[in-house]
Image (spheres, rainbow, N blue to C red):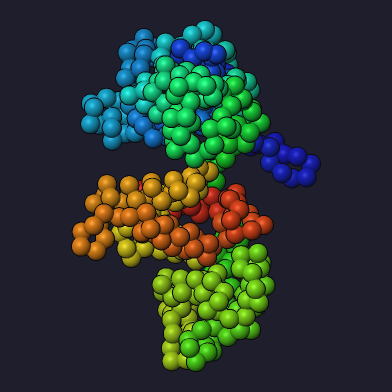
Amino acid sequence: MSSMHTTGTAIPSAVPAYDLRVSIQDTEPEIWRRLLVPETITVTELHRVLQAAFGWENRHLFGIRGVDRHGQPRVIIGPDDAAEEMGDEPASGVVLFELLDAQQAGPATFEYEYDFGDAWTHLFQVMGPAELPAGTVRCIGGANRGPVEDAGGTSGYSRLIEALADPADEDHQDLSDWYTFATGQDAGTFAPYAFDADALNLRLDALAKRLWPEPPTDEEVDAVVRPVQWLLTQAGADGLQLTQDGYLKPAVVRQTVSELGWDYRWPGAANRESQTLPVLVLRQQLQAWKLLRKSKDRLVLSPAGRKMHDGGRPLWDYLATVVAFPAEAATALVTRIVVHWLLEGSTPSWDERERIIADMLNAAGFRVDNGKPVLLADARELYSDVRWTLDCLQLKVPERTFSDVAALTDGGRKFLMQVQELLEGR
């Protein structure tokens, strides 16, 4: 059993860990991180930690090659489907303990390669054994930001640093434009020698919660489903009287905005549903999710709505399923993309979102009228639809304004992880 504070809060138990120094080969000045990771971490989980530690975006294949602690040569590839195609060992089934002996300090006998085109080779040095609270990883040192994705390997990245630092360089403008296109950031903000261990540890804390999740608490469940349960409760046994035009009555609209704390989301009086988009979308979404239905001049609970009326985990599970399985296949693909961005904390700029979504839809074979490719405007509309759908749930820390990029709550992260698991299993 774990020890306890006098307040009754459990202290996480300590687990054996490695103290590793990881550096990217042939970088000058050297890009490195010192990481504490549990001995039982899988290669796939280690890959995720390294992606966060060096600022990679998980766009490419990765591999481990070398000799394990028993002297056996290993070639380990991820993701697993790529390993199967290449005839190599899949990453998810390998634990780091198989590869490293924490008691043998010095250079490791294996290396991690990310992006087989740019060939970013990460070298490991075992500093010794360590201990960590269970379910955590930690960075205790490092230098320089990670390379820019798809920069062309170490030589391409060195050239990028050189050109961006010199406005007189003949490639300065072209590479500044490329940097903005590739990262969504102004090239003037590029700081190749910056490193913030505290900021990285915040990202690692969030990653650890995704790698080793705990079930949602009752409070987290109630918070996430609250907007949906609120409207189900208002409908109650008798339903809600609608206006002649089929909208919720002004008093219900005002009360919904007030009770859910949505004043920041929609300026104005918020007394007409047709002009209060968050409430309109919530009501329409509950109908699309078959929790509410119109009956003559009233909005009433559907059979599913009556079953879910009390909220809790049954409503949470129901909502995770309907979010993961929308009616339209294109919406399902965009949901997968948006959920990934939210969980990774890597939502691109507006322009980049449209381009990425359009490219992925076209690559998946989706077409619009008359067989034409998906345009940026179509991608923008689908992204907005998915965002509004997710905003019918309380997944994030309340923003100050609608345009803010808010952090997920712990409950919101656990809900989206359940959605992602359903999407990956479809």
Q: Residue at x 49, y 14 (%)?
A: 27
In this picture, residue 277 sits left or right of residue 384: right
> Outermost residue toward the right?
6
Above or below: residue 81 compared with residue 414: above
Give the x, y percent position of residue 239.
Answer: 52, 86
In this picture, residue 59 sits left or right of residue 13: left
Above or below: residue 72 compared with residue 426: above
* Residue 393 or residue 149, whichever sits in front: 149
Q: Quadrant of the N terminus?
A: top right
In this picture, residue 112 sits left or right of residue 366: right
Asked whether the viewer can see residue 284, the reply is yes
Give the x, y percent position of residue 273.
Answer: 55, 79
* Residue 112 or residue 341, whichever sits in front: 341
Give the x, y percent position of residue 426.
Answer: 31, 53
> Outermost residue toward the left?
370
Residue 13 occupies which quadrant of the picture?
top right
Q: Residue at x 66, y 77 (%)?
A: 269
* Residue 261 or residue 319, whichever sits in front: 261
Asked whether the viewer can see residue 43, the reply is no
For the image shown, how many numbered marks are present on the structure?
0
Q: Residue at x 47, y 63 (%)?
A: 389
Q: Residue at x 20, y 62 (%)?
A: 370
Give the x, y percent position of residue 372.
Answer: 23, 57
* Residue 17 or residue 412, whichever sits in front: 412
